[in-house]
Image (cartoon, rainbow, N blue to C red):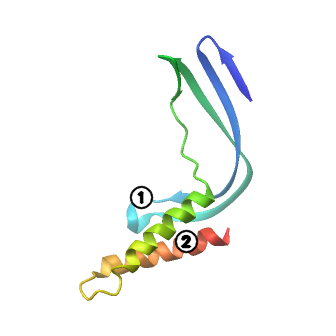
Amino acid sequence: MVKFRAGNATVTVFYKTLAKSEGEGLEQRRLIRRISNKDKVVFKLSYLHGKWKIIDPPVLRISKTAMIARYEESILEYRKIINKPDISAAQKKAYQKEVETLEFLVSL
């Protein structure tokens, strides 16, 4: 649904949510299952200099396909170095977390 008023607009979009991110940084961040068939998001827009601009953007929504592609790319890069003798424990741990996250995303 779109509503216009004097150079401003609101656009209502409904998303299907599969998961959400919790925590900060590599160590704390994780995805948790959160199924919602109708997540309502309202975008506020303003028409400035001949273009519509989002004002006060809501929390990002990222498609499952895009997330899987991002993790697959990351894992491919890790695989280039994972068996090298000088790889650190932190790098091994980060790689394992990427693999686990990808498995979780595929399972949704």
In this image, 97 relative to 44: left or right?
Answer: left
Q: At which x and y percent is residue 24?
A: 41, 58
Q: At which x and y percent is residue 80?
A: 36, 79
> Quick one: label 2, few (<14), some, or many (20+) residues within 10 Å?
some
Residue 54 to residue 105: above or below: above
Front tag of 1 and 2 = 2
Q: Quadrant of residue 95?
A: bottom left
In this image, 22 relative to 3: left or right?
Answer: left
**Label 1 or label 2, whichever comes before in sequence order:** 1
Residue at far top of view: 6
Task: Report the residue at 56% width, 65% height from top.
Answer: 68
Give the alpha-carbon distance from disc 1 to disc 2, as whole Å.
18 Å
Q: At which x and y percent is residue 22?
A: 51, 59
Q: At which x and y percent is residue 25?
A: 38, 61
Which label belongs to residue 37? none
Residue 23 to residue 55: above or below: below
Task: Report the residue at 55% width, 60% height from top.
Answer: 67
Task: Report the residue at 61% width, 32% height from top.
Answer: 43
**SS for dot 2:** helix
Instruction: Tell me the kind of residue under disc 2.
Output: Leu
The quadrant the N terminus occupies is top right
The residue beneath circle 2 is 102
**SS for dot 1:** loop
The residue beneath circle 1 is 24
The quadrant the C terminus occupies is bottom right
Residue 75 to residue 51: above or below: below
> Quick one: label 1, few (<14), some, or many (20+) residues within 10 Å?
few
Instruction: Tell me the kind of residue under disc 1.
Output: Glu
